Image (cartoon, grey):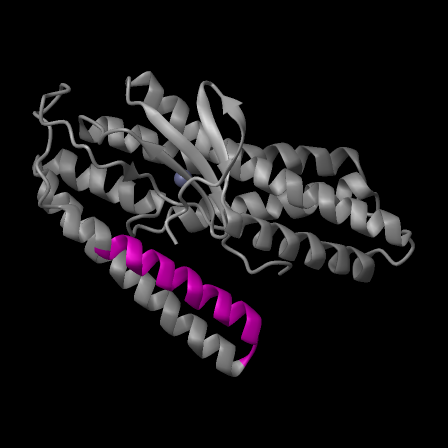
Amino acid sequence: MDGGPGIKIGRILGIPIYLHASWFIIFALITFSLAKQFAYQHSHWTDAQHWAAGLITSLLFFGSVLFHELAHSVVALRYRIPVVSITLFIFGGVARIGREPASAKQEFNIAIAGPFSSYLLAGGFRLLMGVFPSSDMLGALAEWLSITNLALATFNLIPGFPLDGGRILRALVWGVTGDFARAARIAARSGQLVAYGLIVFGIWRSLTGSFRDGLWLAFIGWFLLTAAQESYAQVHEPRPAHGRASHLARRLQLRSAAHRPPLPPGS
Ligand SMILES: [Zn+2]
């Protein structure tokens, strides 16, 4: 699963936006479980309202993921780093950037923009909750989106590559030591640890309590593990000269952190 391009749905800020085939699976799952959740919590609504609220909430959730990716992208573009594409896929979203940031500061700012934007959205939906009671469709939708964006931002701050937190860790070690390769290895190792932790915890949870939630966590862990191992292997690639684009500019399209929903559908 590389989150590579699928169906192009448009362009924002000149960046092509794609839906990967696997996205349709997660979109259907989240919509379906939200409709069921709303039916359980709001039995006075009609069936059509349960499904409409489920569909709109699910769309707004993926709109939130897109917003998160765009936040990374805007900062990257500000540093004149091209953004090749943004793709939504089964584990969330991924913004592909054309080259590595030229400095630790750039890497730090690009990485932190995503979680920051998700916290902003969580706050915005929280404000909406103050206006509409949670028994209303808008109130219920705002509550779920506020909690989910909060969880998305916090999950992505876990310091393991390729999560945003792993990139932040890499930027900090890079900034302090001035040694990119060492920083990248530490962040990738930390990413592997986080991934193994998620897999073990997911399997344990699937055996002891919630089978579906546990399995989902284990899958996310497996996806992160693959990405962390790839990035570890790439550390030995040549880097562009410090501070400016050089002729050694890497041809590799490095993936920015992927942003998967931190929660299993409907939890
Ligand atoms: Zn992010």
Is residue 231 among what the camera can see? yes
Q: Which residue is painted at 44% across and 71% down in the image?
A: 202
Q: Main secondary structure of the magenta part?
A: helix
How many dots with numbers?
0
Q: Which residues are magenta?
A: 209-229
Q: Is residue 267 above or below residue 62?
A: below
Report whether 96 appears left or right of 145: left
Q: In the image, residue 151 lies at what x, y percent?
A: 52, 49
Q: Within the magenta stretch, is there residue 226?
A: yes
Q: Which residue is painted at 37% across and 73% down in the image?
A: 200
Q: Which residue is painted at 44% across and 45% down in the image?
A: 259
Image quadrant holding the N terminus, namely bottom left
Report whether 116 appears left or right of 150: left
Image quadrant holding the C terminus, namely bottom right
Q: Is residue 143 above or below residue 266?
A: above
Is residue 122 among what the camera can see? no
Q: Quadrant of ligand 1?
A: top left
Q: In the image, residue 254 lies at what x, y percent?
A: 26, 38
Q: Which residue is painted at 63% across and 57% down in the image?
A: 29
Q: Within the magenta stretch, is there residue 219?
A: yes
Q: Quadrant of residue 211?
A: bottom right
Q: Quadrant of residue 53?
A: top right
Q: Quadrant of residue 42?
A: bottom right
Report whether 243 appears left or right of 141: left
Q: In the image, residue 214 lies at what x, y percent?
A: 50, 71
Residue furthest front as drawn = 7
Q: In the image, residue 136 lies at what x, y percent?
A: 83, 43
Residue furthest bottom as drawn = 208
